[in-house]
Structure formats: structure tokens, C-alpha cells
Amino acid sequence: MAESIITFFIEKLSDLITREANFLTGVDEQIDSLRNELEWMRSFMKDADGRCKDNERARLWVNQVRSISYDAENVIDEFIFKVERQRQRERGIGQLKLLHDLGNEIEKIKKRIEEVSANKSKYGIETLQFGEPSSSSQQSSSSRRQRRTPVVVEEVDVVGIEDEAEKLVRQLIQGEPQLSIVSIVGMGGLGKTTLAKKVYNCNDVSRHFECHAWIYVSQEYNIRELLEGLLDQVVELNKKQQREVAQMTDHKLQRELFGYLKERRYLVVVDDIWNEEAWDSLKAVLPEATTGSRVMVTTRNKEVALHADMESLPHELRFLSEEECWTLFCKKALPKNVPPVLSPELQKVGRDIVAKCGGLPLAVVVLGGLLSREDRIPSEWAKVLKRINGKFCEGHDQITRILALSYDDLPYHLKSCFLYLGVFPEDHEIPARKLIQLWVAEGLVQQRGNETMEEVAEDYLEELIGRSMVQSSRRSSVGIKTCRIHDMLRNLSISEAMEDKFLDIRQIIDFESPVRAHRLIVYGDLRKYISLNHNCPTRYLRSIFCHNTQLYYENFSRRHWRFLCGGFRLLRVLDLPQLEITELPHEIGEMIHLRFLGLRGNYLTSLPTTICNLINLQTLDIKPTYALAPCMQDIPNAISEMDQLRHLHMNWGRILGPSRIENLRNLQTLSEIEAGSWIEDGLAQLTNLRKLVIRGVFNSHREALLNSIVHLENLQSLCLSTCTFNDDKNILPTLIFSNHVHLYKLQLLGRLEKLPNLHEFPQNITHLNLQGSCLMQDPMATLEKLPHLRTLVLCYKMYRGKILVCSTGGFRELQELELIELTELEEWRVEEGAMSSIKRVKLFACLCLKMLPEGFQYMTTLKELELILMQAIKARILPENVGEDWYKIQHVPLVVIKDSYSRGPRSY
């Protein structure tokens, strides 16, 4: 791990030499010498990576190197801070003193390096046998690129729980009408959540209950967050309702939730609950009505299950049998396109390895992920078995040690990325976008060819998923949306990270103890931590993350900000989500080392001009959450000075005055920003843009958009909208995307002069959203020919005609279709052979549509039909009336009907 620390610092030294060549006259040779010394250290440590844990001398030496690297980084960061502060204050004095002090500090560091280097020889560390590096760490860049193919854990990989799943399904849909609790109990890694998900997603279960919800509790839970999430899922709140819920008192929220569930047959999964207090907090909103409702609980603690329902015996998961373990191992260790035919020698070694897992599915999966990267020859697998036998003895802790073995086997560039997962709360669904941006900001991602750092980081994440160290939660057609880490692996990452001083975690009770790590995760009130530590902040601290158990800070004052900005001015990452603030103080500009500033979920309406002093900032995320009312966010025009900016996430940003936005050549994300003169002045120069969202497009912007977007050939996602969907005066430009081979998602929200021709659409588009287009000609004739289209949303006056026709062979790849508020649509024809891959259809408030198309009976892949405010069609499909249209959809597993948007569904 110290190797990655040195790597980041060497890059910082190189940047300093390049940027400050003139200023550093007199100490440039000293800095260059320091860099060379560290390069030699890094080379040795890279070879020793992960293989010196069992040698006390080597471990001590690594700690010394880490300490030197941290101290050297402090010297350079303080120097950069002082130089930049002089520039901002337009002072030229003090340069000689700064250089003199820097030179002295560098000499001290070099003397320490000489001592440590001498110790390496003196105590025989150079002669230690670290063993051969794993084949994983030697893979070429071409093999890494092959890993871009998503590795997804399908349900077919589930082994040994089929019988248990059937029993649980019967328990849920049969039995007494009174509320009952179905509990799944077992140790961590035994597959409780896997089994619960299999049952929850079962078609029979989905159709039986009127509303469903899944909430993760974990050890650190926030009851308010859990209740809001529960209500959001069962009611499917729109944004206005979400804002209303956020303003409710706790008592009113509980009353609303209880009242809603009382009259419905509901299924709620309470996953990973640890104590009785958490259950008692949730129980109050779960009515014991005679509607046949069920609650499914997963827990490691049998006492919690019995406390929830003394009348219902918990379902205790068993360990896998030897053959089940072997089957699961083969699914993970062998690629799916390779027949699982193994030589007798290889099978014997493999079975010996699997036997070490003790029947625990998580251990089997992780070891399978490890072996999937090794050559399938007995000698290579025997090396892994030897490492297990040599390092671990039988005992209670053996499973944890097996998981640690997979961590040790990670290539050095993945170790720090894995440890970084410990900054997120337990059972947290981690946005891949945020994780990747944090990895880049922290310097954990290495440059590779012409790829962006984000593309390399995405490969890192895919490899961690492929190794089963991370779980993919949600994917889009182009990559990972969210991921999770099993809590046993999270515990491993935290223990390893704290041992390496990679991060530290503080609860309210230990706020006053010193922090010796580079990253601090605070659970509790950050104000208290700042107040206790602002006078003596840690010299190593570079990142602060806060997970506030109270959810919102109501009194985060300017005084706290001053303490934070002044006392922790060397921070690289500051992530304070749900910080209820209306303005940032001008002192924020003093934190010139910031690379990531995350304030998602706020009331900010403007940014101070000093924000532009953050010359190293890569990610600025000040987007409000759904609970907050939309608002304009003013951006100072000097933002163009922040030339390292890569990602800007806002609500509706508005650049004040003229701006040289063309200077932001590194910008990849610009979302969401108001149209303005900046489009004409510099948008075409932002050729690294991947995501662009522009609001408030007027006719005066059309030509500039046409001329600019044609140059943005790296775009992956584009959204353009006029001020409102009722805006009939302003027309969005008809863009031609012949050169945009990476553009997969397109949203055009506003009136169109005409629908683009087939050749004008992006050739690889998978997601298309058209709203308020006011088209009179049937769009399906063009859209159904888009070869890769998977999701299509036609919404609110998009089509003003009366008939839609989906032709035979059209929409071959389409999986999701939504028709929303097409109020003039009277007839929809679907020919046999159309939409041959469709999985989900949603119809919302198409009030003149009187019947479902005949072609629905041929859509054998359709899994879900959702009808909202579709009274005429509802009357034709009700099964108890043997409705005229029921035969068209009787094969669909899930049909959901809602009489209003805020009321619960009826399922058939």
C-alpha cells in the first residue's frame, strides 16, 4: 500500500517541477533528487507488495517508508499552499524564504531516506524472498481491456437454495390473513440476502402482493431514512411528493406510512437487521391488519428473529454440501464459454481448495474469483492451496483469512481501490460514478495509454467485481450504475486500511483521539469533531467523509466553515452530503488542494468567487437531492480558471457574465447548466465532454448548439430542454449525430421542428427520451429501425396524432417502453413480430386510448405491464370480469394497475 502513496507523491513532484519551473530555481535539483530516491523505493516496494506481512522487519521498513512519504507530502503541500496564497494576495515578497525553507525540509527528508535505505541492507530486507508476483499483477494492458466486458453474477450462479426458496414462497403467499414475519437467519456470507432476493423477485410473489419494498438496515442505521425509503417504494412518490415527505415530522411520516399500508397486502423485506431496537422502531409502521401482508427479515442474530415474531420459527440457513460448494466454485472459477471439464489432477487440487471454505458460499465465490485469474493447470492452483495451508490453520477465523488471501492476491493497483470501499457505510448502495471520481481524485488510478482516468477506473471496478470482491447492484447497457460490498469484505477492507493508516473511522465517542491516517470517516455530528480538533488538526489528513446519523445539519455555521477551511487546508477530498446550507463562505477558496468537493443535497443558490481559487478541483458536486425544491445556482464567470475541473454536477447552473469556458478542456461532465452565450463562446472546444445537460434553450441558441455539438464526438449522454414543456415558442435544434459513435443516451425535452431522420440519430443509441415534441407524424416508423434501442420514453405532447403503429420486425432490441400523457392517442397497433425483446411496458394517462393492441398476445418476453390512470383499459382487463383484453396479457407475470399516481397498485 505504501507503493501507491509513493506513486501519488512522485506524480505531485513531477507536476510541481513542470508548473513551477521558474519559481523553483535553486531547489529544483534537490526536488529532482528526492523524486529519483523515491522512484527506487517504489520499485522495491512494488516487488514486495502484499508479500511482507509475515515478516516483522519488512513490515517495519514499509511503515518507515510510508511515514517519510507522508512527511514529504506535507512539506510539498504546505509549500504549494504558501506559494498560491502569495499569488492570490498579489505579493512577491517572501520567495527566497520559502525556497530556503523548502530546501532545508527536503534535505531532512533525504537524510531520513538514506537512513531507511541503509536499514534495508543492514537488516537483510533486500535478501528476503517475497515470492513470485501473482499472474494477476502481470497481465498486459490488452488483457485488461478485455475485462471491459461486464461480469455479472446471474441467478444461475445461485447454488443450494432452491428448496429453501420454494418453502419461503409458500410461506409468503399462503397461510393466515394476519400479518406474519418470515425470518432468514445465518452467519455472514451464508447467502441470506441472496435467498431473500430470489424469493422477492419470484413472479408468484410479485403478483400476490399489492406493494413491495426492500430496506437495508445494517448496524449503523437511520430510522428516518429507512421510513422515507419505505414510503417512497410502496407509494412510488413523484418529486413533489418526495419534497413533501422530506418536510414531514417523524410522527406524521409514521402515520402516513401506517395508514397507507393498513389497507393493502404488502411485502416488506428488512435486510440485515442486527438488534431488537431497530425492529421495534420499524414495527410501529407495519400494521397487523388481516390483509395477508408479510414481512421478511434477514439477520445474523436468531434472538432478533424470535423477538420479531415468537410464533414463527426462523428459517436457519445451512452450510453448503461438498458437491454444492464444488458446483458453485466451478461457476465462478471457470469462464462460462469454457466447458467445466477438468483433469483429475486439477479437480483434486480444486476440491482440496474448496474444502477450506467450510461450506460458506461467500468464501467459495471469492476463492473462485481468485482462481478465475490463474492458469487452469494443477501447478498454479497448487500454489494457491499451498498459500492457504501455509498461512492459515483450521479455526474460527479461517473464513476471514481466506477472504484476506484474495485481498493479498489483488494487483497492487487494485488494493488501494478495494480499501477505499471502507469509506462508505455498511450496506450502502455505492454510485459507481462517485466511486470512480473519488478514486481519480485520490490519485489511485494510473494513466494508461490514451484512455481517460475514469475509463481506467471503470476497468478497475469491473475487475473487482469479476473477482467477487465487489457486487454489481445495477447496470445500464453501457456499464455499472451502482455496486455494493458484502459486510464481511467491508470489514476486511476497513481492518486492512486502518492497519496501513489508509483510513480511520470515528464515532462521536472517540472524536478527541488523534487521527494518524490520510482519510477520516466521521459518523455523527461533524460540527463537534471540528470544534474539538480545529486547533490541532492532523498533519496527515487529506480526506474527510461524513455520514451524519441525524441526516441533516441544521446549524452548520460560518464559524464551523472557518474552522474547517483554516484547520484542514491540505484536504484533497471533502464529502459532506445532505449538508443543509444556503451559501459557501469565501474561506472555501483557501483549500487549494481540493480535488473533490461533494455537497450533494443542499440549498445553495450561488458560489463565492473564491471557489475559482480551487485550481486543483476535479469534481464539484452541488446538486440538490430529490427532497429539495429546484433552484438556480449562480456560477462566477471566473470558473474558467479551474482548468483541472472534470465533473460539474449542479441543479440549474447559470454562468454570470462572459466566461472563457473553452479553458475547461478536461471537463467530462457538465450537468445541469442554463443555456447562454457560453455556448457560442467555447462549448465546441470542450471535446472531452461525456455528459452534457443544458436547460432553458431558446431559439437564439439553436445555431450555436448546432455548430458546437457536432465537435463533441466523445459525448455519451446528451440532454437538451427548453424552459417548460408548454413552451411552444422555442424549438430545439435538429441535430445530426453521424460522428457521435459513443452517444448512447439522448433526451430532447421540448418542441421539435421535425423528428430526426434515421441517419441523423446516433448510430449506437440505446436510451431515447422525447418529451413535448409536438409531432403530428407517427414517430414509430423511424424509431423502430434504431438497431440498438433498448429504452424508449415518449412523454407529454411528444406525439399529437391519433394512431401509433409498431411494425413486424421493428424494435428488435427494445426492452422498456413508456408512453406517458399522450393525451390525443386513440389507437395503438402492434403487429405480430414487433418488439420481440420487450420486457416492460408502462402506460400513463393516455386517456383516449381505449384498448390494448392485439399484438400484446405475441409479446412473449413481456414481464411487466404497468397501467396508471388508464381507466378504459383497466375495465377491459379485470380478470374477475373476464375482460375483453385479458387474453392479450394473461401470459404477463406482473400486471400493475394504479387508479392515481399517488395510490398503490393492484397486481394480478
Image (spheres, helix red, strand yellow):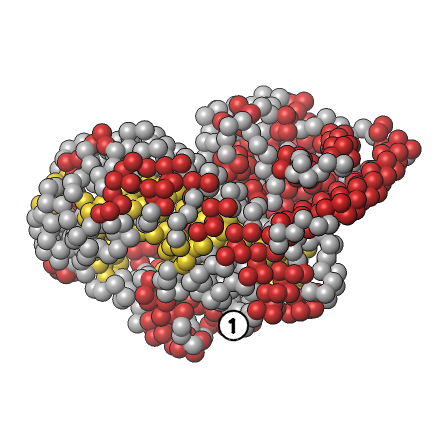
Graded by Cα atoms within 10 Å as few (under 14), some (14 to 19) or many (20 or more), the crowding at tag 1 reads few
- Residue placed under numbered mark 1 in the picture: 554
Report x, y in % for residue 532.
Answer: 70, 68
For image coordinates 14% across by 61% down, the residue present is 871
Please identify the quadrant where the N terminus is shown.
top right
Q: Residue furthest bottom?
A: 251
Name the foreground residue: 68 vs 521.
68
Q: Is residue 816 visible?
A: no
Determine if residue 802 is in view: yes
Is residue 382 shown left or right of residue 769? right
In-front residue for pair 862/571: 571
Q: Quadrant of residue 285?
A: bottom left
Residue at image position (60%, 31%) is 371
Residue 207, position in %: x, y?
30, 55
Q: Is residue 185 left or right of residue 12?
A: left
Is residue 121 depicted above or below 669 in this figure? above
Rendered image quadrant of residue 213: bottom left
Residue at 53%, 23% (x, y): give it.
142
Q: Position of residue 522 (x, y in %)?
A: 62, 61
